[in-house]
Image: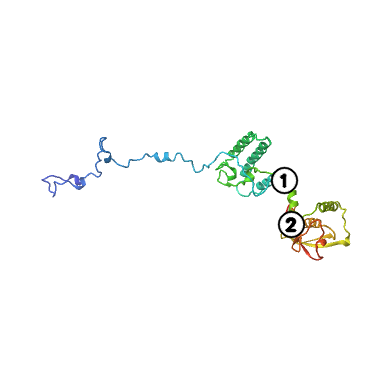
């Protein structure tokens, strides 16, 4: 048998409808549409022109890769301390403690940050010592920037107080007092004089009475005699006093002379309880602070009664 194209066609064909074209003789693909000529109106053309395969890639060409972090140039940070007074010694001590107690992030990155900050600290000190000469500051910034970039540490804002990132995306937070010294950093000599004035003022405020200069001179002489071992009390005059500390520490029992001053008693309480040198003790009895240059018994204390030892920062 033949295919559909081999059967005869025409008016004398034995098949009905021989004059009609066979459906299978139609072309499978439709004929190409005629292309519009250049002088045809724009409305007859297609509204959607095919885009170049490089159009999307060209739009994305200006965007940085996701693995690249934002890194701004390192800049100085200035701040004013309002909640506490910083001294050079306090800054050095607490900065060392800060870096020794870091447990998050990578240890080598913390070392890099510390090295860069030490360069900035030294540059700030040198700039202040040179009376406004800013050359050391610019050199310090450039050196610190090179240290950070060598370790691939990035700064999103250029300010270390806003934190830094390492190459793996870990965040490293840095407080202001770590980044640089406050503008109002206190000098050691001025700080000691101010501290002495505050201690004397605090004594007056707690007692509610003003001591005369004669009493202060006598008390200072008594304190020196006690420190040198000249103010020795007789054994029969010694009394045992229980002191209850304010910092949830166990009670301590101290032996003092009947005429021994409250200041000497407070010093013994601090030594017996193991308080650090940054703490001081004030003695209270029956709801009031006792004067430090008088004895316990001279201010109404009775044998067997417990006194309160209030712990304050120096």
Secondary structure of the residue carrying numbered label 1: helix
Q: Residue furthest left?
A: 12
Q: Quadrant of residue 33?
A: top left
Is any atom of residue 277 visible in this view?
Answer: no
Residue 51 is situated, as x and y percent measured from the top left of the image, at: 36, 40
Please name whichever residue, 255 or 166, is drawn nearer the observer in this view of the structure. 255
Taking the image as shown, residue 170 lies to the left or right of residue 277, namely left
Between 193 and 33, the one nearer to me in the picture: 193
Q: Secondary structure at mark 2?
A: helix
Query: Counting residues from the N terminus, which is met first, the one under dot 1 or under dot 2?
Result: 1
Few, some or many C-alpha atoms within 10 Å of disc 2 (few <14, some 14-19, many ≥20)?
A: few
Query: What residue did someone put label 2 on?
Result: 206
Give the alpha-carbon distance from disc 1 to disc 2, as whole Å: 22 Å
Q: Position of residue 109 (x, y in %)?
A: 61, 44
Image mark for residue 191: 1
Which of the pair 165/300 is nearer the observer? 300
How many marks can you see?
2
Residue 187's spot in the image, x, y percent?
71, 43
Decide: few, some or many residues near mark 1? Use Cα within 10 Å; few <14, some 14-19, many ≥20. some
84 to the left or right of 35 = right
Q: Are marks 1 and 2 in contact (CB under 8 Å)?
A: no
Q: Is residue 314 left or right of residue 256?
A: left
Looking at the rendered image, the disc whose residue lies closer to the viewer, 1 or 2, is 2
**Visible residue check, residue 127:** yes
The label number, if any, that marks residue 207 in the structure image: none
Nearest the eye: 256 or 276: 256
Q: Position of residue 118 (x, y in %)?
A: 65, 40
């Amino acid at each position: 048998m033949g295919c559909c194209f081999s059967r005869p066609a025409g008016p004398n064909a034995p098949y009905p409808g021989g004059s009609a074209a066979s459906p299978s003789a139609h072309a499978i693909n439709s004929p190409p549409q005629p292309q519009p000529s250049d002088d045809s109106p724009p409305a007859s053309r297609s509204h959607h022109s095919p885009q170049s395969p490089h159009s999307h890639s060209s739009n994305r060409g200006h965007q940085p890769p996701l693995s690249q972090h934002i890194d701004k140039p390192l800049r100085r940070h200035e701040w004013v301390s309002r909640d506490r007074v910083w001294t050079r010694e306090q800054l050095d001590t607490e900065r060392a403690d800060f870096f020794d107690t870091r447990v998050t992030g990578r240890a080598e990155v913390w070392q890099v940050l510390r090295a860069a900050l030490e360069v900035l600290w030294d540059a700030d000190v040198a700039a202040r010592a040179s009376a406004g000469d800013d050359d050391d500051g610019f050199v310090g910034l450039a050196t610190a920037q090179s240290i950070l970039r060598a370790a691939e540490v990035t700064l999103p804002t250029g300010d270390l107080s806003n934190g830094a990132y390492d190459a793996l995306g870990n965040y490293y937070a840095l407080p202001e007092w770590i980044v640089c010294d406050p503008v109002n950093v206190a000098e050691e000599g001025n700080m000691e004089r101010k501290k002495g004035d505050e201690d004397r003022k605090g004594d007056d405020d707690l007692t509610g009475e003003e001591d005369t200069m004669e009493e202060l001179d006598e008390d200072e002489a008594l304190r020196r005699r006690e420190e040198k071992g000249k103010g020795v009390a007789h054994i029969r005059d010694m009394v045992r006093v229980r002191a209850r500390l304010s910092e949830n520490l166990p009670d301590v029992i101290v032996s003092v002379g009947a005429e021994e001053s409250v200041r000497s008693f407070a010093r013994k309480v601090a030594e017996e309880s193991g308080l650090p040198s940054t703490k001081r003790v004030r003695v209270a009895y029956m709801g009031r602070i006792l004067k430090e240059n008088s004895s316990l018994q001279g201010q109404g204390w009775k044998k067997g009664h417990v006194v309160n030892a209030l712990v304050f920062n120096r």
